[in-house]
Image (cartoon, rainbow, N blue to C red):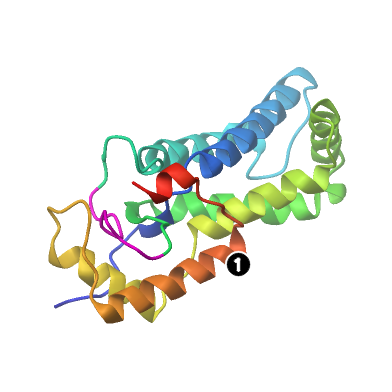
Amino acid sequence: MDTARPTNVRVVPDLDDELLRAIDRLEALLASLAVWEMDAEVGLPAPFADRKALCVLQAVGDVVRPTQGRGGQQLVTGRLPRRGWTGRLLPLRFVPIADAPLATLEHAMQVLTVQRAYPSLNAAVDQFAAVLGEPPLALVSCLSRTVSLLTLPWDDDVYKLWGSVAAYPAKCDTELSRSEQQAYGRVVRRIGQLWSYRPRVSRQRA
């Protein structure tokens, strides 16, 4: 079986609404920057200029949204693990997300970490953070965690799980072998280092 990494595919955990809330929060920030750019007639650095980062995040969000919420209609095949799984329940899916938009979001994250070097961007972020009543660093951290989650590097364990999914492309829930279960556990631990997720009790019984 060919288990080479497919082009523009990422492994994405189902975090109920946690990931969607983070995406919505970042979309609100980027929309605020777009309004600031237009109203204040100032230039923002790439990739924030001309709503580029906002449009990219919206496109990525459109792909990610159907993958969240185990109890809902399953719109994406290849969910791991199957129903009845007795281990830690954090469903994973292989989702088609192009590399280029994620690279743009990584660029946005890098620029935000040095936003003070860009007075217009820094002022816009500070204003939005003040409205939310939280420090700007919290917004940077939110973007960093979200991008890191969506760009989780492929290692041997992810390749092993992809092989399981690719073998049965028409199935939604995929049954894992013992070695695949171990790989799944290690991938989930990697995700846990990026995102402190607490599944709902009701979902654990799904």
What residue is shown at x 53% (from left), y 58% (from top)? Answer: 149
Q: Nearer the viewer, residue 176 or 38?
A: 176
Q: In this rendering, is residue 178 above or below 86?
A: below
What residue is shown at x 82% (from left), y 42% (from top)? Answer: 136
Query: Is residue 41 covered in magenta?
Result: no
Q: Quadrant of the N terminus?
A: bottom left
Residue 148, position as x, y percentages in the image: 57, 59
Mark 1 Cα shell of 10 Å, populated few (<14), some (14-19), many (≥20): few
Q: Which residue is mark 1?
A: 193
Which quadrant of the structure image shows residue 28? top right
Quick one: SS at disc 1? Answer: helix
The amino acid type, in three-letter code, at marker 1 is Gln
Task: Characterize the magenta stretch by its predominant secondary structure.
Answer: loop
Magenta range is 77-87
Q: In this rendering, is residue 116 above or below 28?
A: below
Q: In this rendering, is residue 200 above or below 24?
A: below
Residue 36, position as x, y percentages in the image: 75, 25
- Whether residue 36 sits left or right of residue 205 in the image: it is right
Q: Nearer the viewer, residue 127 or 67?
A: 67
